Amino acid sequence: MNMRDDISMKTDDVLKVELEVFRREHSDLDEAIRALQDRGTSDQLTLQRLKKQKLLLKDRIALIEDRLTPDIIA
């Protein structure tokens, strides 16, 4: 199922909850990536996987924010 289709069937309240969860997960991944990089002995494959997950979450967050933010015609 497409991400865009997935959010089209959800209410704004559900999307707001998911948005907070995704933001928290994004922040947690950022901390994990930073910790691995600071340690200096990080596994490059693991880092790439975490960065990819972080980018996917960023895309989901953007989609939900776009859906929740009303279009304003100036």
Image: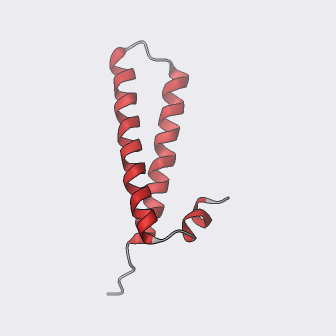
Position of 43 compared to 65: left or right? right
x then y, percent, for residue 39: 35, 15
Q: Nearer the viewer, residue 13 or 27?
A: 13
**Residue 73 sits in quarter:** bottom left
Position of 9 compared to 26: left or right? right
Q: Nearer the viewer, residue 22 or 54?
A: 22
Above/below status of 71 relative to 59: below
Above/below status of 61 relative to 9: above
Above/below status of 50 relative to 21: above
Position of 47 compared to 3: left or right? left
Above/below status of 4 relative to 35: below
x then y, percent, for residue 52: 52, 39
Position of 3 compared to 72: left or right? right
- How many dots with numbers? 0
Q: Residue at x 52, y 30 (%)?
A: 48
Q: Residue at x 46, y 41 (%)?
A: 54
x then y, percent, for residue 28: 37, 37
Q: Residue at x 39, y 21 (%)?
A: 36
Quadrant (top left/top right/bottom left/bottom right) for the C terminus: bottom left
Q: Residue furthest bottom?
A: 74
Quadrant (top left/top right/bottom left/bottom right) for the N terminus: bottom right
Q: Residue at x 48, y 54 (%)?
A: 59
Q: Nearer the viewer, residue 21 or 60?
A: 21
**Residue 6 sits in quarter:** bottom right
